[in-house]
Amino acid sequence: MTVDELNEELWAAMKASEYADKRPVFGLGSPNAKIALVGEAPGHEEEKLGEPFVGKAGKNLTEFLKAVGLTRDELYITNAVKLRPSKPSPKTGRALNRTPNAREIEFFNPYLHRELEIISAKYIVTLGNVPLRAVTGQDLKIGDCHGRLLSAGVYKNVFALYHPAAVIYNQSLKEVYLRDLEALCDEIRSV
Ligand code: URA
């Protein structure tokens, strides 16, 4: 099965579910990528453009990747949840991004694993707690395992990074983030 075929199946499952009116944002990138990056869920910009990591967090991510010499074409980028989780703003009623809930994560989880199996990238890089847990199936904390390789079930090389949006809100994470990315690069280039 190809990723496109899997996406068609997922879209059909969404249309038959409580998420029928949501627009999915599927993974993007080379199916032969060595690294699969897994984010949390698309935000407003991603939903609008139908591509993962094209908003503010994506710009941050691209900048970090550039700083360590990785380009987007070396990667496959996807999310643990393929729809934009939103809630109405109490002030304006407009949709605001929110963290995906357990039900959304569970709905997309089997598709995420099938997607990762098809891509079979050597490294899976998780961005933040949601994908770290969705990929490993373990109740891990990013603060305890960022910047090093983990092995979890069929995934032998999981590398946990903070979510790029976390760095927008907490500038002190920037150095940690760059150090972690350098460690990832050293690992990848040593093979
Ligand atoms: N944050 C994510 O986790 N994924 C996106 O696609 C965009 C922002």
Image (cartoon, rainbow, N blue to C red):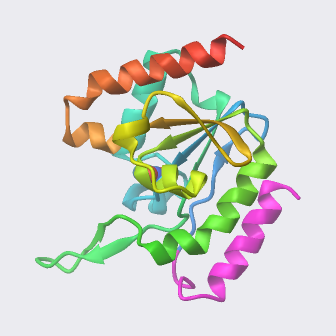
Q: Nearer the viewer, residue 105 or 152?
A: 152
* Left or right, 29 with reference to 37: right
Residue 20 % position (x, y): 57, 85
Quadrant position of residue 134: bottom right
Of 76 and 136, the residue lying toward us: 136
Q: Is residue 57 left or right of residue 125?
A: left
Q: Nearer the viewer, residue 175 or 85?
A: 175
**At which x and y percent is residue 189?**
65, 12
**Is residue 46 rendered to the left or right of residue 30?**
left
**Residue at horizontal 73 percent and vertical 32 percent from the top:** 122
Q: Tell me where the magenta segment starts and ends, as one range.
A: 1-22
Q: Residue at x 78, y 55 (%)?
A: 3
Is residue 3 highlighted in magenta? yes
Picture layout, residue 143 above or below residue 149: below
Q: Looking at the image, can residue 162 be seen?
A: no
Q: Is residue 21 above or below residue 104?
A: below
Q: Residue furthest right?
A: 1
Q: Residue at x 59, y 75 (%)?
A: 107
Residue at 70%, 58% in the rendered image = 113
Does residue 10 show up? yes
Q: Position of residue 40 (x, y in %)?
A: 46, 55
| Quadrant in which the N terminus is drawn | bottom right
Could you tell me which quadrant the C terminus lies in?
Answer: top right
Please provide percent x and percent y for residue 31.
Answer: 77, 41
Tell whether position 120 is magenta: no
Q: Nearer the viewer, residue 185 or 96?
A: 185
Q: Is residue 111 above or below residue 21?
A: above
Q: Is residue 105 left or right of residue 116?
A: left
- How many badges with numbers are in the image? 0
